[in-house]
Image: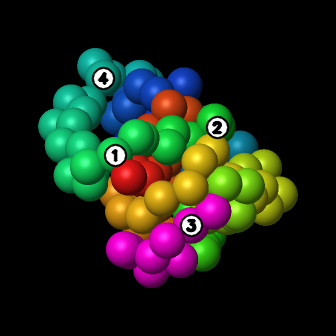
């Protein structure tokens, strides 16, 4: 028997699966154990002074288009977010100085603060 942790719809389960190596057709039932405890939530990244810019969808932060402290103009793409294999530019809703609260390669949820613009 081999043991695995499997995540289904946000719940983690410990399962045991029998490995068949001699070609026999014996199958063992998969037994779901009690849910495995989840890791403690990670504290939100600190954000700068200013108005927050939130993610409209869950996805992967593919690119930060400016450096922290850069001046951005309303309508400019400030972050490229990948969701469902598509790159989506997140535009600055207003002009100001940007402070990112995320980094490239991070996975973000819908509503997560990506940066602030002051």
Task: Find the magenta span and give its range.
Answer: 66-73
Measure the alpha-carbon separation of dots 2 and 4: 28 Å
| Disc 3 to disc 2, C-alpha distance | 22 Å
- The answer to whether mark 3 and mark 2 are in CB contact below 8 A is no
Q: Quadrant of residue 12?
A: top left
Could you tell me which secondary element the residue under label 3 belongs to? Answer: strand
Q: Give yes or no for contact between labels 4 and 1 (Cβ–Cβ under 8 Å).
A: no
Disc 4 or disc 3, which is closer to the eye? 3
Provide residue 87's location: percent of width, then percent of height: 79, 61
Of residues 84 and 89, the one nearer the viewer is: 89
Q: Position of residue 42 (x, y in %)?
A: 21, 44
Query: Closer to us: mark 2 or mark 4?
Result: 2
Q: Which residue is mark 2?
A: 57
Dividing the picture into quarters, in which one does residue 57 lie? top right
User: Which is closer to the viewer, label 4 or label 1?
Assistant: 1
Q: Position of residue 9 (x, y in %)?
A: 54, 25
Q: What separation in Å lies between label 1 and label 2 (alpha carbons)?
A: 21 Å
Of callouts 3 and 2, the N-terminal one = 2
Compute the Cα span from label 1 to label 3.
Answer: 13 Å
Dot 4 corresponds to which residue?
35
Image mark for residue 72: 3
């Amino acid at each position: 028997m081999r043991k695995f942790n499997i995540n289904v719809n946000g719940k983690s389960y410990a399962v045991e699966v029998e490995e068949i190596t001699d070609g026999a057709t014996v199958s063992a039932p998969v037994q779901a154990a009690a849910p495995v405890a989840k890791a403690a939530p990670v504290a939100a990244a600190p954000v700068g002074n200013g108005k927050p810019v939130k993610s409209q969808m869950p996805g992967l932060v593919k690119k930060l288009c400016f450096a922290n402290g850069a001046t951005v103009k309303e309508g400019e793409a400030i972050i490229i977010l990948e969701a469902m294999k598509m790159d989506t530019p997140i535009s600055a809703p207003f002009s100001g100085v940007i402070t990112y609260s995320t980094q490239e390669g991070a996975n973000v949820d819908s509503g997560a603060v990506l940066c602030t613009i002051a």
